[in-house]
Image (cartoon, rainbow, N blue to C red):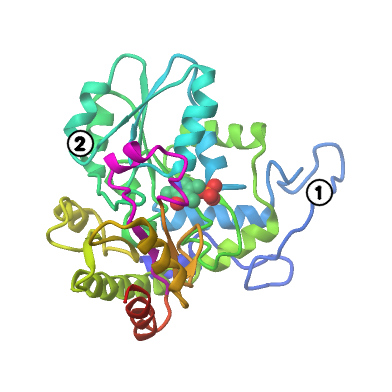
Amino acid sequence: MKFNTKTIHGGQEHDKAYGAVMPPIYQTSTYAQSTPGGHKGFEYSRTHNPTRQALEKALASIENGKFGLAFGSGLAAIDAVIKLLEPGDEVVSTNDLYGGSYRLFTSIFKKFGIKFHFIGMENADNIESYINNNTKLIWVETPTNPMMNIIDIKACSEIAKKHNLLLAVDNTFATPYLQQPLDLGADIVMHSATKYLGGHSDVVMGALIVKDQELADKLYFIQNASGAVCGPQDSFLVLRGIKTLHIRMQRHCENGKAIAEYLANHPKVENVYWPGFENHPNHHIAKEQMNGFSGMISFTTKGNNYEEAIKIVENLKIFTLAESLGGVESLAGHPASMTHASIPKEEREKTGVVDSLIRLSVGIEDIDDLINDLRLAIG
Ligand SMILES: *Cc1c(COP(=O)(O)O)cnc(C)c1O
C-alpha cells in the first residue's frame, strides 16, 4: 500500500458487529467477562480500547512502523520514552527544541538523575563528542522550532547504531507525509498528534511508533503502568484527521512555498527561515530526507523591532494569533513574547529567536487571501 492509501486504510478493518466503515467510539472503561479472564481481548480501557487500538494501528502504518502507541498529549509520549531510562543515564538532545520538551527534560527528569546534553546537531559530527558509557538515547527534532533547522536523521542513526544507542525523532513538524524517520534508521518516532495528524486544532494527543517488538513491549508496559492514555473520542478525531493528512499536507506545502517566496521578496523582511530555499544551510539534507518543505515558516523584519513585530501579528486578520500549529487554519506567533518569553533575551537570541521573529503555521486557505493578509499587516 502506498502512503495516500495508508492514511485512509492503513491498519484498519471494518467493524465486526455492524460493518461500520469508521471504527465506533467505544466510550467504555471496562468490558464484560463471561468467566474471570474470559474476555474478547479487552479488559480495561487504560490498557486497551478498540477505538484507540484502531488509531494505534493507523499510526504504525503511516510511519512504516509495526507498533503504534497513543497518549494523552505529545509530552506524555515523550515522558514515556524517557521512562525507558534509569538514573545515571545520559541523553544527547537537539538544542533548538520544543520548549515543553526542554522543560520536561530539565525540570522533571533531571531530578531523577538523568543527564541531558543540549547541542547543535546541524552538523551530526558534533554528537559523538557528547557520547560516553552512560549515554542511552539521542533525541532529535527536525525541522526545529522555530528556526527550521534541519538535522540529518540517517547520519544520527549511524552514530546511534555505532554506539548502541536509541534514536528518537520528534516528527511533529514534518509528519510521515514529508519524512519517515524509521526508514532512515530511527528506533522511535514521536508525534504531537495535536498538530498536523489531528489537523483541525480540536484535540491534544501524542503518539509513538516503533518497529522493534521488545522496545514496543517496554513502551506498552510504560503506557499502561503510567497511564497517560488518550480517550476514545479523541482517538476517533485523530483517526479521522489522518485520513486527510496527505491532501492537507500537499496544500500546506504549496501555500508554504508561495508565502516563503512572497516574504523573501518583501522589502521590509530581513530573513526567511524555510528549508525549501536553496540558501538554507541544510537545504541539501532537507531535499534528501523530506518529500517537501512544509508550511512552517519563520521570518524577521529589518530593524529587528519588538513593537513592530507585535503590531504585525496583531494586525493579521486571517492568520490567528495563537500558540500551536498544524491545523487547517493559518496561525501566527511571536516567539519572543509567547513560546520563548521565559528564556532570557541573550539566551534566546543565541539560537536566532530575536525580537522581530514571527512564526507562521500556514494553513490551507486560499493563498491569495493569506498573502493579502500579510501584505496589509506588514505594510
Ligand atoms: C506541540 C509539540 C510538542 C508537545 O505536544 P503536546 O501535544 O502539546 O503535548 C512536542 N514537540 C513538538 C515539536 C511540538 O510542536
- What residue lies at 26% left-to-right and 49% top-to-bottom? 149
Label 1 Cα crowd, 10 Å radius (few <14 / some 14-19 / many 20+): some
Number of disc labels:
2
Horizontally, residue 227 falls left or right of residue 334, namely: right
User: Is residue 57 shown to the viewer in this render?
Assistant: yes
Q: Of label 2 and label 1, which has the lower sequence position?
A: 1
Q: Secondary structure at mark 2?
A: helix
Ligand 1 contact, mark 1 (Cβ < 8 Å): no
Image location of residue 221, percent across then percent down = 60, 32
- Per the image, the residue denoted by label 2 is 124
- What residue lies at 51% left-to-right and 59% top-to-bottom? 11
Task: Tell me where residue 330 sits by quadrant.
Answer: bottom left
Label 2 Cα crowd, 10 Å radius (few <14 / some 14-19 / many 20+): some
Which quadrant is home to the C terminus?
Answer: bottom left
Of the two numbered discs 2 and 1 in the rendering, the one whose residue sits closer to the viewer: 2
Residue type, numbered disc 2: Ala
Name the residue nearer the viewer: 50 or 29.
29
Q: In the rendered view, would you say 146 is above or below 271?
A: above
Image location of residue 207, percent across then percent down = 52, 48
Which quadrant is home to the N terminus?
Answer: bottom left
Image location of residue 362, percent across then percent down = 39, 69
Q: Name, please, the residue furthest toward the right.
A: 35
Q: Secondary structure at mark 1?
A: loop
Does the magenta run of residues contain 233?
no
Residue type, numbered disc 1: Tyr
Start-end of magenta stretch: 336-363
- Per the image, the residue denoted by label 1 is 31
- What residue lies at 57% left-to-right and 63% top-to-bottom? 239
Q: In the rendered view, would you say 17 is above or below 117?
A: below
